[in-house]
Image (tube, rainbow, N blue to C red):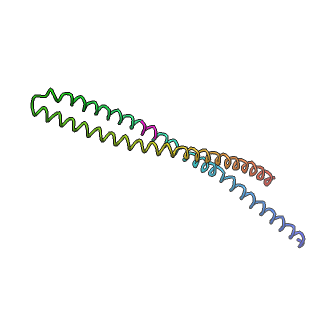
Protein backbone atom coordinates (compact mmCIF):
# COMPACT_ATOMS: atom_id res chain seq x y z
CA UNK A 1 0.00 0.00 0.00
CA UNK A 2 1.06 3.47 -0.80
CA UNK A 3 1.50 6.13 1.88
CA UNK A 4 -1.33 8.22 0.37
CA UNK A 5 -3.72 5.27 0.62
CA UNK A 6 -2.67 4.64 4.23
CA UNK A 7 -3.23 8.32 5.08
CA UNK A 8 -6.63 8.21 3.42
CA UNK A 9 -7.59 5.06 5.39
CA UNK A 10 -6.30 6.59 8.63
CA UNK A 11 -8.22 9.81 7.96
CA UNK A 12 -11.36 7.75 7.31
CA UNK A 13 -10.80 5.84 10.57
CA UNK A 14 -10.35 9.11 12.47
CA UNK A 15 -13.59 10.42 10.96
CA UNK A 16 -15.39 7.19 11.88
CA UNK A 17 -14.03 7.44 15.43
CA UNK A 18 -15.27 11.05 15.68
CA UNK A 19 -18.68 10.01 14.34
CA UNK A 20 -18.80 7.12 16.82
CA UNK A 21 -17.90 9.46 19.70
CA UNK A 22 -20.57 11.92 18.57
CA UNK A 23 -23.15 9.10 18.44
CA UNK A 24 -22.17 8.01 21.95
CA UNK A 25 -22.54 11.61 23.20
CA UNK A 26 -25.95 11.94 21.55
CA UNK A 27 -27.16 8.62 22.98
CA UNK A 28 -25.92 9.55 26.45
CA UNK A 29 -27.72 12.89 26.22
CA UNK A 30 -30.86 11.12 24.99
CA UNK A 31 -30.71 8.62 27.86
CA UNK A 32 -30.53 11.46 30.40
CA UNK A 33 -33.80 13.05 29.22
CA UNK A 34 -36.26 10.81 31.13
CA UNK A 35 -34.37 11.39 34.40
CA UNK A 36 -34.39 15.15 33.83
CA UNK A 37 -38.14 15.04 33.16
CA UNK A 38 -38.71 13.08 36.37
CA UNK A 39 -36.65 15.55 38.41
CA UNK A 40 -38.58 18.50 36.96
CA UNK A 41 -41.91 16.87 37.70
CA UNK A 42 -40.70 15.83 41.16
CA UNK A 43 -39.81 19.40 42.11
CA UNK A 44 -43.20 20.69 40.97
CA UNK A 45 -44.95 17.83 42.77
CA UNK A 46 -43.09 18.64 46.00
CA UNK A 47 -44.34 22.24 45.82
CA UNK A 48 -47.89 21.02 45.12
CA UNK A 49 -47.76 18.72 48.13
CA UNK A 50 -46.50 21.55 50.33
CA UNK A 51 -49.40 23.79 49.31
CA UNK A 52 -51.95 20.96 49.62
CA UNK A 53 -50.56 20.07 53.04
CA UNK A 54 -50.88 23.67 54.19
CA UNK A 55 -54.44 23.86 52.91
CA UNK A 56 -55.29 20.58 54.64
CA UNK A 57 -53.72 21.74 57.90
CA UNK A 58 -55.66 25.00 57.64
CA UNK A 59 -58.94 23.13 57.19
CA UNK A 60 -58.15 20.77 60.07
CA UNK A 61 -57.18 23.67 62.35
CA UNK A 62 -60.38 25.54 61.50
CA UNK A 63 -62.42 22.43 62.29
CA UNK A 64 -60.60 21.89 65.60
CA UNK A 65 -61.03 25.57 66.48
CA UNK A 66 -64.77 25.42 65.80
CA UNK A 67 -65.11 22.23 67.82
CA UNK A 68 -63.13 23.66 70.74
CA UNK A 69 -65.30 26.80 70.67
CA UNK A 70 -68.47 24.72 70.75
CA UNK A 71 -67.13 22.59 73.60
CA UNK A 72 -66.13 25.72 75.55
CA UNK A 73 -69.60 27.17 75.05
CA UNK A 74 -71.15 23.90 76.27
CA UNK A 75 -68.89 23.97 79.34
CA UNK A 76 -69.93 27.58 80.05
CA UNK A 77 -73.60 26.60 79.74
CA UNK A 78 -73.02 23.68 82.10
CA UNK A 79 -71.44 26.04 84.66
CA UNK A 80 -74.47 28.36 84.45
CA UNK A 81 -76.85 25.43 84.82
CA UNK A 82 -74.94 24.18 87.84
CA UNK A 83 -74.88 27.63 89.44
CA UNK A 84 -78.66 27.90 89.12
CA UNK A 85 -78.95 24.66 91.10
CA UNK A 86 -76.93 26.00 94.06
CA UNK A 87 -79.88 27.70 95.84
CA UNK A 88 -81.80 24.43 95.76
CA UNK A 89 -79.07 22.41 97.48
CA UNK A 90 -79.86 21.13 100.99
CA UNK A 91 -76.69 19.29 102.05
CA UNK A 92 -73.01 20.14 102.30
CA UNK A 93 -72.08 17.06 100.27
CA UNK A 94 -74.27 18.12 97.34
CA UNK A 95 -72.89 21.64 97.60
CA UNK A 96 -69.28 20.36 97.54
CA UNK A 97 -70.05 18.07 94.58
CA UNK A 98 -71.58 20.92 92.56
CA UNK A 99 -68.68 23.25 93.36
CA UNK A 100 -66.27 20.52 92.27
CA UNK A 101 -68.17 20.01 89.00
CA UNK A 102 -68.31 23.78 88.40
CA UNK A 103 -64.57 24.02 88.99
CA UNK A 104 -63.97 21.12 86.60
CA UNK A 105 -66.15 22.70 83.89
CA UNK A 106 -64.44 26.08 84.31
CA UNK A 107 -61.00 24.45 83.98
CA UNK A 108 -62.16 22.63 80.87
CA UNK A 109 -63.51 25.88 79.43
CA UNK A 110 -60.21 27.69 80.10
CA UNK A 111 -58.29 24.83 78.46
CA UNK A 112 -60.60 24.89 75.45
CA UNK A 113 -60.35 28.70 75.23
CA UNK A 114 -56.54 28.44 75.29
CA UNK A 115 -56.67 25.78 72.58
CA UNK A 116 -58.99 27.97 70.51
CA UNK A 117 -56.62 30.93 70.79
CA UNK A 118 -53.64 28.78 69.88
CA UNK A 119 -55.48 27.40 66.85
CA UNK A 120 -56.54 30.91 65.82
CA UNK A 121 -52.92 32.05 65.89
CA UNK A 122 -51.85 29.04 63.84
CA UNK A 123 -54.68 29.66 61.37
CA UNK A 124 -53.66 33.31 60.97
CA UNK A 125 -50.06 32.30 60.34
CA UNK A 126 -51.05 29.64 57.81
CA UNK A 127 -53.43 32.03 56.07
CA UNK A 128 -50.63 34.59 55.87
CA UNK A 129 -48.12 32.03 54.54
CA UNK A 130 -50.45 30.34 52.04
CA UNK A 131 -50.39 33.06 49.33
CA UNK A 132 -46.58 32.95 49.26
CA UNK A 133 -46.66 29.16 49.00
CA UNK A 134 -49.22 29.33 46.20
CA UNK A 135 -47.13 31.94 44.39
CA UNK A 136 -44.02 29.77 44.76
CA UNK A 137 -46.02 26.82 43.40
CA UNK A 138 -47.15 28.86 40.40
CA UNK A 139 -43.57 30.00 39.76
CA UNK A 140 -42.24 26.45 40.10
CA UNK A 141 -44.92 25.09 37.74
CA UNK A 142 -44.14 27.79 35.16
CA UNK A 143 -40.42 27.11 35.53
CA UNK A 144 -41.02 23.37 35.17
CA UNK A 145 -43.15 23.88 32.05
CA UNK A 146 -40.44 26.04 30.50
CA UNK A 147 -37.71 23.56 31.39
CA UNK A 148 -39.86 20.67 30.15
CA UNK A 149 -40.37 22.50 26.85
CA UNK A 150 -36.59 22.96 26.63
CA UNK A 151 -36.08 19.24 27.31
CA UNK A 152 -38.66 18.38 24.64
CA UNK A 153 -36.91 20.68 22.15
CA UNK A 154 -33.58 19.14 23.07
CA UNK A 155 -35.02 15.69 22.47
CA UNK A 156 -36.22 16.68 19.00
CA UNK A 157 -32.78 18.10 18.22
CA UNK A 158 -31.09 14.97 19.55
CA UNK A 159 -33.30 12.69 17.46
CA UNK A 160 -32.57 14.78 14.39
CA UNK A 161 -28.83 14.73 15.15
CA UNK A 162 -28.93 10.97 15.75
CA UNK A 163 -30.65 10.38 12.45
CA UNK A 164 -28.13 12.59 10.68
CA UNK A 165 -25.19 10.91 12.42
CA UNK A 166 -26.36 7.39 11.58
CA UNK A 167 -26.80 8.15 7.87
Percent of width and height locating residue 86: 17, 30
Q: Residue furthest bottom?
A: 3
Residue 61 falls inside the magenta stretch: yes
Up-down relation of residue 44 to residue 20 (above or below):
above
Q: Furthest-left residue in view?
A: 91
Q: Is residue 80 left or right of residue 134?
A: left
What's drawn in magenta, residue-wise? 58-62
Left/right placement of residue 144 relative to residue 165 reads left
Horizontal side of 11 relative to 106 (left or right) equals right
Task: Identify the residue shown where x is 40% and y is 42%.
Answer: 119
Give the vertical position of 159 relative to 20 (above or below): above
Q: Is residue 118 rendered magenta in the image?
A: no
> What residue is at 70 percent from the left and 49 percent from the top?
150
Where's residue 43, x and y in %?
58, 49
Q: Which residue shows up at 69% across the image and 55% down it? A: 29
- The quadrant in which residue 71 appears is top left
19 is higher (above) or lower (below) than 51: below
Q: Nearer the viewer, residue 21 or 148?
A: 148
Amino acid sequence: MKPAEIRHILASLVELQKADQRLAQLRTAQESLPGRRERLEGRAQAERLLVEGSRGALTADRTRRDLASLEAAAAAERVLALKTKIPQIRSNDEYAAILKEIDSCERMKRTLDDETLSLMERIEKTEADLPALESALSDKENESREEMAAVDAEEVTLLHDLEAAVV
